[in-house]
Amino acid sequence: MSNIKKGIFAIALVVSQICLAQISDELMLYRQDFKDISGNNTVSVTSYKKDSFHFVFAGGAGNIDIYELDKEGKLTHINNHELYKSKGPARGMVADNINGTDFLFVANKHGNVIETFKILSNGSLKRVALVEDTDETHLGTAITLQIIHMKNASYLFVGGLEETPGLSSFKIESDGKLTHVQSMKDDETIHTDGIIGMFTHKINGKTFLYTGGFQDNGVSSFRIYENGEFKNINSISDNTEDRYLTGAYPVTGVALGANNYVIVGHRHHKYYKRSNFIKRPDFVYHGDGVSVFKVNKKGALIPHFVLKDDETTKLQGQTRIEVVSTTSSEAILAVGTRDDASIQLCKLSEDGILTPINYLETGFSIYYGLRSHKIEENNFLIAGSFRFDLKKIATYKVSPKIDREGKVLRHMVNFKYKETATKQQVQEAVDTFINLKNEIPEIAEMEWGVNDSEEGHSKGLTHCFTLTFNDEHAREVYLFHKAHLDLVSKIGAIIADVLVLDYWTK
């Protein structure tokens, strides 16, 4: 290549990197779809590509719902599968290919078992193995699973929250059965009391596992060996200076350039109201933040950076952190929150600095159910909530922010009532809808009326309600608000048809 061509290539590369950086700084979440679930709630979500199909598994109390996800982010429900003893929830779920067979591994939290399902061609599940808790394996109240592939075998690591917590390793056999390898009981030197997040790095031919300890407020690193055994390398506890680890919750990581990072969020103990649930009640609330740790050559964690929550971010009660995308120089992360009921997008630079981008108030609190999934060039987030009145799962596309400056959103709802509906029932439905303005402050304006068109094209729709929202967040809050869900439930029996249209206008 000539010097001129090299120069042009270098300039093009720099320009493309600048453009990518500018785009990543303006990323936003846009809801693509939402669907009902068959269970009472959605506690965890995972996804898996099998052949040319993309499947989503939503685990709740007692069962798992299965969907197909298309390239537009639309969900199609396939079926559901009952968990062992109808217990659950399916708190930890991970899918992978083991020696040519696709499996879904499920931590049945209150069933105190690990279930192995074979993923069939249409995404349906067939249980092929089950491992129950013992005094040695620490599977009681199992919460988090992590698969680690070594040269000659694959292993399932299990963490949970129980009276005798710890970390366990199982060899995954070709038929999906699990063979116990090692368990390490929690003590004062390691942070494995309430492992709600785990992540794996492979560095210079060595494998390392990182765990968060919810109850003992810290993170630990472990060296994983070829036979599935492991040993602790170092552990780091919470403080009020260079880390925020009280109630350590989600754990993830990325490799950028020559640097390896582990990112840890927390749901601070102050957010828990249940008495006697927090083992160390003498904690001090020092704010919310996402901690970034750098990994050294020995696999040990080194405190590096903290993104602290403020009035411009939504980081209260972090329950899941997903890696949306990575390049050689940066990563886009999504932080799901239970207490802020939002998804916060952040950018991690190659030098380990985490900065907020944009957030979306989802309208529902996210517990553990947030999953990143890519189809072709589209990056999606799939989210669910533990709310028993919601019973929904939603998808979002991560894409450049749309300019809404100076615009408001009109949300038009048109009803056709059944011929059997009485005047009193219709009036009660109207009154309930009008009262949403008092129940949901995110509704900026509302007007309504009865159809007066004589053109004959109203298709039997008689009542029109027009709501105004000032931004994306307000529509989401309205859509999943309890008062709105109660309205849908209350008037559903007398509705013959409904037409909904949304548009942005100045």
Image (spheres, rainbow, N blue to C red):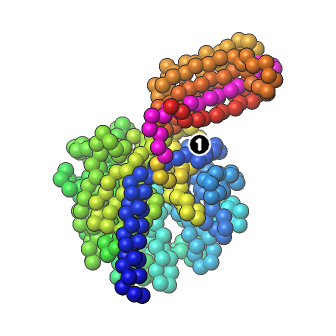
Apparent side of residue 293 relative to residue 228 in the rendered image (left or right): left
Residue 154 visible within the image: yes
Q: Residue at x 52, y 58 (%)?
A: 379
Label 1 element class: strand
Q: Residue at x 40, y 72 (%)?
A: 13
- For the residue pair 459 and 433, the one nearer the viewer reads as 459
* 12 to 88, vertically: above or below: below
Q: Residue at x 47, y 84 (%)?
A: 151
- For the residue pair 199 and 140, the one nearer the viewer reads as 199
The magenta stretch is 402-421
Residue 269 visible within the image: no
* 377 to 424, vertically: above or below: below
Residue at the outermost front position = 4
Residue at the outermost top position = 424
Report x, y in % for residue 431: 61, 15
Q: Is residue 112 magenta?
A: no
Q: Is residue 406 magenta?
A: yes
Bin the neighbour count of mark 1 within 10 Å (Cα to Cα): few under 14, some 14-19, many 20 and up.
Answer: many
Report x, y in % for residue 251: 38, 59
Q: Residue at x 42, y 62 (%)?
A: 20
Residue at the outermost left position = 241
Report x, y in % for residue 378: 55, 59
Residue type highlighted by circle 1: Lys
Report x, y in % for residue 170: 48, 72
Apparent side of residue 474 relative to residue 183 in the rendered image (left or right): right
- For the residue pair 93 and 11, the one nearer the viewer reads as 11
Quadrant showing the N terminus:
bottom left
Q: Which residue is mark 1?
A: 392
